[in-house]
Amino acid sequence: MMLQHRRKNTKSEIEFKWAAPSPKTFEALLQNVKRLGARLGLKRNVILRDTYYDSPAFDLLAKGIKCRIRKTGAACELTLKTNLSRTKEMVHRNEETWVLKKAGRGQLSLNSELQLIKKILSPRLGTISPVLLFRLTNHRLIVPIFLADGTVAEASLDRVQLNRGKRKRNIQEIEFEFVKGSETSFKRLARKLVNETPLKPSSSPKFDTAMHLYKPY
């Protein structure tokens, strides 16, 4: 099974991550968004199936890079994520994404994914030998948010199952992501939501929780 790929884009991503003890926390956030003068868009549900890779020696993480293949329905993308800055609740990162396509029918094999990752990463990291770290399935509820000045954000409730061999973990968290417009307006609304809801930083984000499951194995 041959895989084809093309570069999609490079973008900067800003998002807040908060703990979600229950779905009521997310509903409270949405109510406060409206009370603070923003408008909610139509809710939608998606299922994200993510697989993370690195070398056996964690060469990518040592360079501050996370490598993910994401499948959403029939779509499949490879993304390299590099943090530019990070606080307890906010992450500013750079993302490079490639669209992956199968040349033919059938499911994407693990070997095909590994070979394609090696091909894409070789210009910058040399002869890396990628291995699968963990998989996660994320049932994500997404709500677009429209601010009065035209700024657009997305609030998401993530219900995630992490899998590393026989080890499994279920977690919930809220993501609040900048889409376009004024970063200042976006961050101002986020800070108001922290105080009004109230919201606490996610004590163990998805990736960190999964890596805790990974070591030792």
Image (cartoon, rainbow, N blue to C red):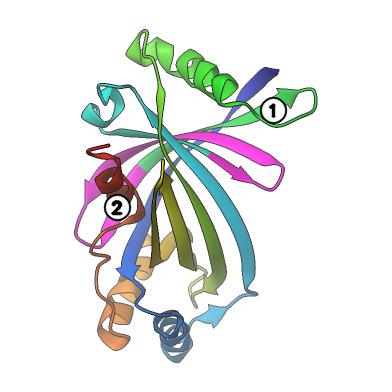
Q: Between marks 1 and 2, how big is the CA–CA gap?
A: 30 Å
| Magenta residues (range) | 70-93
Is residue 182 visible to the viewer in this orientation of the structure? no
- The residue shown at (55%, 68%) is 141
Horizontal arrangement in the rendering, residue 197 relative to residue 177 (left or right):
left
Main secondary-structure element of the magenta-colored stretch: strand
User: Vertical placement of 66 versus 72: above or below?
Assistant: above
For the residue carrying disc 1, how many other residues have a C-alpha within 10 Å: few (<14), some (14-19), or many (20+)? some
Residue receiving disc 2: 209
User: Vertical placement of 216 versus 194: above or below?
Assistant: above
User: Vertical placement of 119 versus 150: above or below?
Assistant: above
User: Vertical placement of 4 versus 88: above or below?
Assistant: above
Horizontal arrangement in the rendering, residue 167 relative to residue 147 (left or right):
left
Q: Position of residue 164 (x, y in %)?
A: 39, 43
- The residue shown at (63%, 66%) is 45
Horizontal arrangement in the rendering, residue 201 relative to residue 36 (left or right):
left
Q: Residue 113, which numbered label?
A: none
Query: Quick check: is 87 in the magenta stretch?
Result: yes
Residue receiving disc 1: 101
Q: Position of residue 8 (x, y in %)?
A: 58, 32
- Badge nearest the viewer, 1 or 2: 2
- The residue shown at (61%, 75%) is 41
SS of the residue at dot 2? helix
Q: What's under tag 2, amino acid-wise?
A: Thr
Asked whether 44 or 108 is in front, the reply is: 108
Q: What's under tag 1, amino acid-wise?
A: Lys
SS of the residue at dot 1? strand
